[in-house]
Image: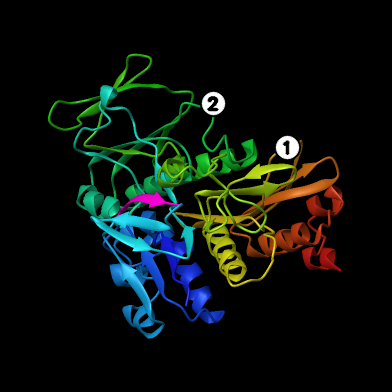
Amino acid sequence: MSHVVVIGAGQAGAALVARLRAGGHAGAITLIGAEPAPPYQRPPLSKAYLMGEMEAERLWLRSAEFYAEQDITLRLGQPVTAIDPAARTVTLGGETVAYDQLALTTGSHPRRLPAAIGGDLPGVYTVRTLADVDAMKAEFAPGRRLVIVGGGYIGLEAAAVAAKLGLDVTVLEMAPRILQRVASPETSDYVRALHTAHGVKILESTGLDRLLGDRRVTGVRLASGAELPADFVIVGVGILPGTALAEAAGLAIENGIKTDDYGRTSDPHIWSAGDCASFPWAGGRLRLESVGNAIEQAEMVADNMLGKVTPYTAHPWFWSDQYDTKLQIAGLNTGYDRIVTRGPAGEAVSFWYYRGDTLLAVDAMNDPRAYMVGKRLIEMGKSPDPAAIADPATQLKALLK
Protein backbone atom coordinates (compact mmCIF):
# COMPACT_ATOMS: atom_id res chain seq x y z
CA MET A 1 0.00 0.00 0.00
CA SER A 2 1.41 3.43 -0.92
CA HIS A 3 2.03 6.05 1.75
CA VAL A 4 0.90 9.59 0.96
CA VAL A 5 2.46 12.37 3.04
CA VAL A 6 0.97 15.87 2.98
CA ILE A 7 3.01 18.79 4.34
CA GLY A 8 0.84 21.70 5.43
CA ALA A 9 -2.23 21.19 7.61
CA GLY A 10 -4.32 24.13 6.41
CA GLN A 11 -7.44 24.30 4.25
CA ALA A 12 -5.76 22.68 1.22
CA GLY A 13 -4.07 19.92 3.20
CA ALA A 14 -7.27 19.04 5.06
CA ALA A 15 -9.28 18.95 1.81
CA LEU A 16 -6.65 16.81 0.10
CA VAL A 17 -6.46 14.05 2.71
CA ALA A 18 -10.25 13.88 3.06
CA ARG A 19 -10.62 13.55 -0.72
CA LEU A 20 -7.94 10.83 -0.86
CA ARG A 21 -9.84 8.67 1.61
CA ALA A 22 -13.21 9.40 0.01
CA GLY A 23 -11.72 8.51 -3.37
CA GLY A 24 -10.63 5.09 -2.21
CA HIS A 25 -6.98 5.42 -1.19
CA ALA A 26 -6.42 2.44 1.11
CA GLY A 27 -2.81 3.12 2.08
CA ALA A 28 -1.40 5.23 4.88
CA ILE A 29 -2.00 8.98 4.91
CA THR A 30 0.02 11.36 7.07
CA LEU A 31 -0.83 15.06 7.39
CA ILE A 32 1.96 17.15 8.89
CA GLY A 33 1.40 20.66 10.27
CA ALA A 34 3.84 23.13 11.79
CA GLU A 35 1.12 24.62 14.01
CA PRO A 36 -0.11 22.74 17.10
CA ALA A 37 -3.77 23.34 16.21
CA PRO A 38 -5.68 20.93 13.95
CA PRO A 39 -6.60 22.17 10.45
CA TYR A 40 -8.77 25.28 10.83
CA GLN A 41 -10.50 28.07 8.91
CA ARG A 42 -8.39 31.20 8.49
CA PRO A 43 -10.97 33.76 7.25
CA PRO A 44 -12.79 34.11 10.62
CA LEU A 45 -9.51 34.88 12.39
CA SER A 46 -9.59 38.56 11.35
CA LYS A 47 -13.37 38.77 11.74
CA ALA A 48 -15.58 36.74 14.12
CA TYR A 49 -12.75 35.15 16.11
CA LEU A 50 -10.95 38.44 16.68
CA MET A 51 -14.29 39.99 17.70
CA GLY A 52 -14.74 37.26 20.30
CA GLU A 53 -17.86 35.98 18.54
CA MET A 54 -16.41 32.53 17.70
CA GLU A 55 -14.75 29.94 19.91
CA ALA A 56 -11.54 28.29 18.72
CA GLU A 57 -13.25 24.90 18.38
CA ARG A 58 -15.64 26.34 15.82
CA LEU A 59 -12.65 27.11 13.61
CA TRP A 60 -11.73 23.43 13.26
CA LEU A 61 -12.42 22.10 9.76
CA ARG A 62 -12.98 18.55 11.03
CA SER A 63 -13.31 16.93 14.44
CA ALA A 64 -10.47 14.88 15.89
CA GLU A 65 -12.75 11.87 15.52
CA PHE A 66 -12.87 12.35 11.74
CA TYR A 67 -9.13 11.86 11.32
CA ALA A 68 -9.15 8.83 13.62
CA GLU A 69 -12.13 7.26 11.84
CA GLN A 70 -10.51 7.85 8.44
CA ASP A 71 -7.16 6.45 9.66
CA ILE A 72 -5.38 9.70 8.81
CA THR A 73 -2.30 10.32 10.97
CA LEU A 74 -2.00 13.93 12.16
CA ARG A 75 1.48 15.15 13.05
CA LEU A 76 0.85 18.61 14.51
CA GLY A 77 3.31 21.14 15.88
CA GLN A 78 6.06 19.41 13.91
CA PRO A 79 7.57 21.52 11.15
CA VAL A 80 9.26 19.62 8.34
CA THR A 81 12.89 20.67 7.99
CA ALA A 82 13.86 18.89 4.76
CA ILE A 83 12.61 16.89 1.79
CA ASP A 84 14.85 14.33 0.04
CA PRO A 85 13.24 13.67 -3.36
CA ALA A 86 15.81 11.02 -4.31
CA ALA A 87 15.21 8.96 -1.15
CA ARG A 88 11.52 10.02 -1.03
CA THR A 89 11.71 11.03 2.61
CA VAL A 90 10.84 14.06 4.73
CA THR A 91 12.59 15.02 7.96
CA LEU A 92 10.85 16.39 11.04
CA GLY A 93 12.12 16.60 14.59
CA GLY A 94 15.12 14.39 13.84
CA GLU A 95 12.85 11.69 12.40
CA THR A 96 12.75 10.57 8.78
CA VAL A 97 9.39 9.63 7.23
CA ALA A 98 9.26 7.80 3.91
CA TYR A 99 6.62 8.55 1.27
CA ASP A 100 5.49 7.12 -2.03
CA GLN A 101 3.73 10.34 -3.02
CA LEU A 102 4.12 13.74 -1.40
CA ALA A 103 1.84 16.78 -1.54
CA LEU A 104 2.98 20.27 -0.57
CA THR A 105 0.17 22.44 0.77
CA THR A 106 2.51 24.78 2.61
CA GLY A 107 0.33 27.86 2.15
CA SER A 108 1.80 31.31 2.61
CA HIS A 109 3.20 33.60 5.27
CA PRO A 110 2.87 37.36 5.82
CA ARG A 111 5.45 39.87 4.72
CA ARG A 112 7.00 41.56 7.74
CA LEU A 113 8.57 44.95 8.22
CA PRO A 114 12.37 44.88 8.48
CA ALA A 115 13.88 44.78 11.96
CA ALA A 116 15.96 47.80 10.95
CA ILE A 117 12.84 49.97 11.00
CA GLY A 118 11.33 48.42 14.14
CA GLY A 119 9.45 45.53 12.59
CA ASP A 120 10.50 43.16 15.40
CA LEU A 121 9.36 45.39 18.28
CA PRO A 122 6.89 43.90 20.78
CA GLY A 123 3.40 45.16 20.02
CA VAL A 124 3.82 44.69 16.25
CA TYR A 125 1.59 41.95 14.82
CA THR A 126 0.64 40.19 11.62
CA VAL A 127 -2.66 38.41 10.97
CA ARG A 128 -2.20 34.92 9.57
CA THR A 129 -2.34 32.18 12.20
CA LEU A 130 -4.43 31.36 15.24
CA ALA A 131 -1.38 32.13 17.39
CA ASP A 132 -1.05 35.56 15.74
CA VAL A 133 -4.60 36.50 16.65
CA ASP A 134 -4.43 34.99 20.15
CA ALA A 135 -1.32 37.09 20.77
CA MET A 136 -3.03 40.35 19.84
CA LYS A 137 -6.58 39.86 21.14
CA ALA A 138 -5.86 41.44 24.51
CA GLU A 139 -4.72 44.62 22.73
CA PHE A 140 -8.24 45.32 21.43
CA ALA A 141 -9.55 47.47 24.29
CA PRO A 142 -11.71 50.59 23.81
CA GLY A 143 -9.78 53.83 23.45
CA ARG A 144 -6.46 52.25 22.51
CA ARG A 145 -4.64 53.56 19.45
CA LEU A 146 -4.03 51.14 16.59
CA VAL A 147 -2.02 51.90 13.46
CA ILE A 148 -2.43 49.47 10.57
CA VAL A 149 0.28 49.43 7.92
CA GLY A 150 -1.26 48.38 4.61
CA GLY A 151 -4.68 49.07 3.12
CA GLY A 152 -5.44 45.60 1.76
CA TYR A 153 -8.28 43.31 2.79
CA ILE A 154 -6.56 41.84 5.85
CA GLY A 155 -5.68 45.25 7.26
CA LEU A 156 -9.12 46.67 6.53
CA GLU A 157 -10.89 43.70 8.15
CA ALA A 158 -8.78 44.22 11.28
CA ALA A 159 -9.61 47.94 11.14
CA ALA A 160 -13.33 47.15 11.04
CA VAL A 161 -13.09 44.90 14.10
CA ALA A 162 -11.04 47.47 16.00
CA ALA A 163 -13.42 50.32 15.15
CA LYS A 164 -16.42 48.25 16.26
CA LEU A 165 -14.66 47.56 19.57
CA GLY A 166 -14.09 51.29 20.16
CA LEU A 167 -10.42 51.68 19.28
CA ASP A 168 -8.86 54.73 17.62
CA VAL A 169 -7.76 53.35 14.22
CA THR A 170 -5.48 54.76 11.52
CA VAL A 171 -4.69 52.91 8.29
CA LEU A 172 -1.53 53.80 6.35
CA GLU A 173 -1.40 53.01 2.63
CA MET A 174 1.66 53.83 0.56
CA ALA A 175 -0.21 53.57 -2.76
CA PRO A 176 -2.52 56.37 -3.96
CA ARG A 177 -5.55 54.41 -2.79
CA ILE A 178 -6.48 51.44 -0.59
CA LEU A 179 -7.02 48.12 -2.39
CA GLN A 180 -5.21 49.53 -5.43
CA ARG A 181 -3.60 46.18 -6.34
CA VAL A 182 -6.82 44.18 -6.22
CA ALA A 183 -9.81 46.44 -6.89
CA SER A 184 -11.18 49.27 -9.01
CA PRO A 185 -11.22 52.91 -7.87
CA GLU A 186 -15.00 52.51 -7.44
CA THR A 187 -14.57 49.66 -4.96
CA SER A 188 -11.80 51.56 -3.17
CA ASP A 189 -14.08 54.60 -2.88
CA TYR A 190 -16.90 52.48 -1.47
CA VAL A 191 -14.69 50.81 1.13
CA ARG A 192 -12.97 54.07 2.09
CA ALA A 193 -16.34 55.75 2.69
CA LEU A 194 -17.47 52.76 4.74
CA HIS A 195 -14.47 53.00 7.07
CA THR A 196 -14.58 56.76 7.31
CA ALA A 197 -18.22 56.54 8.39
CA HIS A 198 -17.08 54.31 11.27
CA GLY A 199 -14.40 56.75 12.39
CA VAL A 200 -11.34 55.07 10.85
CA LYS A 201 -8.68 57.47 9.56
CA ILE A 202 -7.26 56.36 6.19
CA LEU A 203 -4.03 57.98 5.03
CA GLU A 204 -3.26 57.17 1.40
CA SER A 205 -0.08 58.02 -0.54
CA THR A 206 1.56 57.83 2.87
CA GLY A 207 4.93 56.13 3.26
CA LEU A 208 6.29 54.68 6.49
CA ASP A 209 9.75 55.72 7.67
CA ARG A 210 9.97 53.55 10.78
CA LEU A 211 8.23 52.28 13.89
CA LEU A 212 9.08 54.08 17.13
CA GLY A 213 9.88 52.67 20.55
CA ASP A 214 12.63 50.87 22.45
CA ARG A 215 11.19 47.98 24.43
CA ARG A 216 7.80 48.17 22.72
CA VAL A 217 6.27 50.03 19.80
CA THR A 218 5.00 53.47 20.81
CA GLY A 219 4.22 55.03 17.44
CA VAL A 220 5.15 55.38 13.79
CA ARG A 221 7.14 57.96 11.89
CA LEU A 222 5.85 58.71 8.41
CA ALA A 223 8.02 59.39 5.37
CA SER A 224 6.95 63.04 5.73
CA GLY A 225 8.53 63.15 9.19
CA ALA A 226 5.20 63.35 11.00
CA GLU A 227 4.74 60.99 13.94
CA LEU A 228 1.61 59.14 15.07
CA PRO A 229 1.24 57.56 18.52
CA ALA A 230 0.31 53.87 18.62
CA ASP A 231 -0.38 51.43 21.42
CA PHE A 232 0.10 48.60 18.92
CA VAL A 233 0.60 48.09 15.19
CA ILE A 234 -0.77 45.55 12.71
CA VAL A 235 1.19 44.95 9.52
CA GLY A 236 -0.82 43.86 6.49
CA VAL A 237 1.48 44.32 3.50
CA GLY A 238 0.83 41.10 1.61
CA ILE A 239 1.84 37.46 1.81
CA LEU A 240 4.53 35.27 0.30
CA PRO A 241 4.05 31.66 -0.89
CA GLY A 242 5.54 28.96 1.32
CA THR A 243 8.20 27.71 -1.09
CA ALA A 244 11.29 27.32 1.15
CA LEU A 245 11.07 23.52 1.51
CA ALA A 246 10.32 23.02 -2.18
CA GLU A 247 13.14 25.31 -3.25
CA ALA A 248 15.65 23.57 -0.95
CA ALA A 249 14.55 20.23 -2.43
CA GLY A 250 15.32 21.48 -5.94
CA LEU A 251 11.74 21.80 -7.20
CA ALA A 252 10.96 24.38 -9.89
CA ILE A 253 9.72 27.69 -8.45
CA GLU A 254 7.82 30.27 -10.49
CA ASN A 255 5.57 32.63 -8.53
CA GLY A 256 5.17 29.77 -6.08
CA ILE A 257 5.78 26.05 -6.45
CA LYS A 258 5.48 25.41 -10.18
CA THR A 259 2.92 22.77 -11.10
CA ASP A 260 1.47 21.46 -14.34
CA ASP A 261 -2.23 21.44 -15.24
CA TYR A 262 -2.73 18.42 -12.99
CA GLY A 263 -0.99 19.72 -9.85
CA ARG A 264 2.25 17.80 -10.31
CA THR A 265 5.53 19.61 -9.58
CA SER A 266 8.82 19.18 -11.45
CA ASP A 267 9.29 15.95 -9.45
CA PRO A 268 6.87 13.23 -10.61
CA HIS A 269 6.26 12.01 -7.06
CA ILE A 270 5.52 15.45 -5.57
CA TRP A 271 2.33 17.50 -5.98
CA SER A 272 1.24 20.91 -4.73
CA ALA A 273 -1.98 22.87 -4.12
CA GLY A 274 -3.25 26.02 -2.42
CA ASP A 275 -1.64 29.40 -1.79
CA CYS A 276 1.87 28.03 -2.38
CA ALA A 277 1.23 26.58 -5.87
CA SER A 278 1.23 28.28 -9.26
CA PHE A 279 -0.47 26.68 -12.24
CA PRO A 280 -0.83 27.34 -15.98
CA TRP A 281 -3.43 30.01 -16.76
CA ALA A 282 -4.22 31.94 -19.96
CA GLY A 283 -0.79 31.42 -21.44
CA GLY A 284 1.01 32.37 -18.22
CA ARG A 285 0.98 31.24 -14.61
CA LEU A 286 -1.39 32.08 -11.78
CA ARG A 287 -1.30 31.66 -8.01
CA LEU A 288 -4.54 32.21 -6.12
CA GLU A 289 -4.80 33.09 -2.43
CA SER A 290 -8.32 32.00 -1.51
CA VAL A 291 -10.25 29.35 0.36
CA GLY A 292 -12.13 28.32 -2.78
CA ASN A 293 -8.94 27.71 -4.71
CA ALA A 294 -7.32 25.85 -1.82
CA ILE A 295 -10.20 23.38 -1.62
CA GLU A 296 -10.83 22.91 -5.34
CA GLN A 297 -7.18 22.60 -6.30
CA ALA A 298 -6.43 20.22 -3.43
CA GLU A 299 -9.33 17.96 -4.37
CA MET A 300 -8.16 17.92 -7.99
CA VAL A 301 -4.66 16.93 -6.84
CA ALA A 302 -6.08 14.13 -4.69
CA ASP A 303 -8.07 12.80 -7.65
CA ASN A 304 -4.97 12.86 -9.85
CA MET A 305 -2.86 11.15 -7.18
CA LEU A 306 -5.46 8.38 -7.34
CA GLY A 307 -4.93 7.99 -11.08
CA LYS A 308 -7.36 10.39 -12.67
CA VAL A 309 -6.09 12.84 -15.30
CA THR A 310 -8.13 15.95 -14.52
CA PRO A 311 -6.71 19.37 -15.45
CA TYR A 312 -7.40 22.20 -13.04
CA THR A 313 -9.94 24.80 -14.11
CA ALA A 314 -9.92 27.69 -11.65
CA HIS A 315 -13.15 29.52 -10.77
CA PRO A 316 -11.78 32.42 -8.71
CA TRP A 317 -14.00 33.82 -5.97
CA PHE A 318 -13.24 35.73 -2.79
CA TRP A 319 -15.05 37.57 -0.02
CA SER A 320 -14.46 40.09 2.75
CA ASP A 321 -16.68 41.03 5.72
CA GLN A 322 -16.29 44.56 7.06
CA TYR A 323 -18.80 45.96 9.57
CA ASP A 324 -22.23 44.90 8.25
CA THR A 325 -21.03 44.85 4.65
CA LYS A 326 -20.23 41.67 2.77
CA LEU A 327 -18.04 42.19 -0.28
CA GLN A 328 -18.15 39.21 -2.66
CA ILE A 329 -15.83 38.98 -5.65
CA ALA A 330 -16.16 36.68 -8.67
CA GLY A 331 -13.51 36.34 -11.37
CA LEU A 332 -10.17 38.07 -11.88
CA ASN A 333 -10.15 41.72 -12.90
CA THR A 334 -6.65 41.75 -14.44
CA GLY A 335 -6.63 43.78 -17.65
CA TYR A 336 -10.01 45.51 -17.25
CA ASP A 337 -10.55 48.77 -19.14
CA ARG A 338 -13.95 49.88 -17.85
CA ILE A 339 -16.25 49.54 -14.87
CA VAL A 340 -20.02 49.27 -15.12
CA THR A 341 -21.89 50.22 -11.95
CA ARG A 342 -25.19 48.60 -11.00
CA GLY A 343 -27.08 50.34 -8.22
CA PRO A 344 -26.92 51.48 -5.61
CA ALA A 345 -30.21 49.95 -4.53
CA GLY A 346 -30.39 50.66 -0.81
CA GLU A 347 -27.10 49.35 0.61
CA ALA A 348 -26.47 47.08 -2.38
CA VAL A 349 -24.17 48.04 -5.26
CA SER A 350 -22.01 46.08 -7.67
CA PHE A 351 -19.13 46.94 -9.98
CA TRP A 352 -18.69 44.89 -13.17
CA TYR A 353 -15.23 44.72 -14.76
CA TYR A 354 -15.02 44.56 -18.55
CA ARG A 355 -12.17 44.31 -21.03
CA GLY A 356 -13.75 45.51 -24.25
CA ASP A 357 -17.01 43.56 -24.40
CA THR A 358 -15.75 40.70 -22.20
CA LEU A 359 -16.92 40.41 -18.59
CA LEU A 360 -13.95 39.61 -16.33
CA ALA A 361 -15.09 40.05 -12.74
CA VAL A 362 -17.73 41.41 -10.38
CA ASP A 363 -17.41 43.14 -6.99
CA ALA A 364 -20.75 42.95 -5.17
CA MET A 365 -21.41 44.80 -1.92
CA ASN A 366 -24.37 43.43 0.03
CA ASP A 367 -25.70 42.12 -3.28
CA PRO A 368 -25.52 38.31 -3.30
CA ARG A 369 -27.71 38.10 -6.41
CA ALA A 370 -25.29 40.19 -8.48
CA TYR A 371 -22.41 38.07 -7.18
CA MET A 372 -24.07 34.74 -7.99
CA VAL A 373 -25.22 35.81 -11.45
CA GLY A 374 -21.85 37.38 -12.23
CA LYS A 375 -20.02 34.24 -11.11
CA ARG A 376 -22.23 32.03 -13.27
CA LEU A 377 -21.85 34.31 -16.29
CA ILE A 378 -18.06 34.28 -16.00
CA GLU A 379 -17.97 30.49 -15.63
CA MET A 380 -20.27 30.12 -18.66
CA GLY A 381 -18.12 32.49 -20.71
CA LYS A 382 -21.04 34.86 -21.23
CA SER A 383 -20.65 38.65 -21.36
CA PRO A 384 -23.92 40.59 -21.20
CA ASP A 385 -24.27 44.00 -22.76
CA PRO A 386 -22.86 46.53 -20.26
CA ALA A 387 -25.91 48.74 -20.83
CA ALA A 388 -28.14 45.91 -19.62
CA ILE A 389 -26.06 45.54 -16.45
CA ALA A 390 -26.31 49.27 -15.72
CA ASP A 391 -30.09 49.35 -16.32
CA PRO A 392 -31.89 48.82 -12.97
CA ALA A 393 -34.88 47.39 -14.88
CA THR A 394 -32.80 44.42 -16.06
CA GLN A 395 -33.57 41.18 -14.24
CA LEU A 396 -30.09 39.76 -13.69
CA LYS A 397 -31.27 36.15 -13.63
CA ALA A 398 -32.60 36.53 -17.15
CA LEU A 399 -29.04 37.13 -18.37
CA LEU A 400 -28.20 33.50 -17.64
CA LYS A 401 -30.61 32.15 -20.26
Q: Counting other residues with Cα less than 10 Å from the Cα at mark 1, is it few (<14), some (14-19), or many (20 or more)?
A: few
Residue 318 located left or right of residue 107? right
The spot of residue 98 in percent (x, y) is 38, 63
362, 192: nearer the viewer:
362
Q: Amino acid at mark 1?
A: Gly
User: Percent position (x, y) of residue 112?
Assistant: 35, 35
Mark 2: secondary structure: loop
Spatial CA span between label 2 and label 1: 19 Å
Determine the residue located farthest toward the top in the rendered image.
225
User: 49 or 2, which lies in front?
Assistant: 2
Q: Is residue 83 magenta?
A: yes
Measured along the vertical axis of the image, is residue 8 above or below residue 68? above
> What residue would you read off at disc 1?
335
Which corner quadrant holds the C terminus?
Answer: bottom right
Relative placement, left or right, of 201 versus 365 is: left
- Type of residue at label 2? Pro
Which secondary structure, mark 1?
Answer: loop
Question: Seen from this angle, which residue lies furthest front?
Answer: 87
Q: Is residue 291 left or right of residue 77?
A: right
Which residue was labeled with disc 2?
Answer: 176
Estimate the x, y position of residue 103 in percent, counting from the top left: 48, 60
Q: Mark 2 vs mark 1: which is more N-terminal?
A: 2
Q: Which residues are magenta?
A: 79-85
Farthest bottom residue?
Answer: 69
